[in-house]
Image (tube, helix red, strand yellow):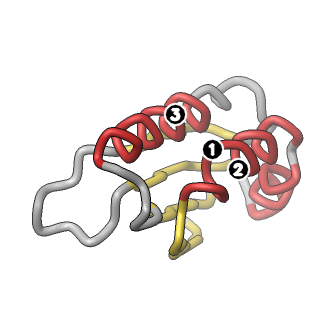
Amino acid sequence: MVKHVILWQLKDELSETEKQNTKQLIKLGLEGLAGKVPGLIDIKVNINGLSTSNADVMLDSTLESFDALKGYAVHPAHVAVAESAVKPNTKLRVCMDFEI
């Protein structure tokens, strides 16, 4: 199995209200991929970091294999969420993928 973990920082120009709405949009969009993407075992998005955090959104997902991760990356449902909610609103993305 493979873990796929991403941390994002939202764009500075977003107001606090826009940031809260964006975080919820990203969470709903990504967690909505459960059952839609082959090989995606588990997906959780955390948007409630403590004040000591320097990231706004965390994705924690588990996939069956590295091939499943490659398929997830290009799956139309995932691409739609990334293009509509994530990429337009984030300034920094850090990713770590590893086998478990």
Alpha-carbon span between mark 3 and mark 2: 11 Å
Q: Secondary structure at mark 2?
A: helix
Alpha-carbon span between mark 2 and mark 1: 6 Å
Kind of residue at badge 2: Ala
Alpha-carbon span between mark 3 and mark 1: 7 Å
Residue drawn at x 57%, y 61% is: 4
Q: Bin the neighbour count of mark 2 within 10 Å (Cα to Cα): few under 14, some 14-19, many 20 and up.
A: some
The answer to whether marks 2 and 1 mark residues whose Cβ atoms lie closer than 8 Å is yes
Against 12, residue 60 (above or below) is: above
Disc 2 target residue: 82
Kind of residue at badge 3: Leu
**Left or right: 68 as drawn, with respect to 90:** right
User: Is tag 3's residue or tag 1's residue first in the polypeptide sequence?
Assistant: 3
Mark on residue 25? 3
Residue drawn at x 53%, y 40% is: 26
Residue 88, image x, y percentages: 65, 56
Mark on residue 97? none
The answer to whether marks 3 and 1 mark residues whose Cβ atoms lie closer than 8 Å is yes
Q: Secondary structure at mark 3?
A: helix
Disc 1 target residue: 85
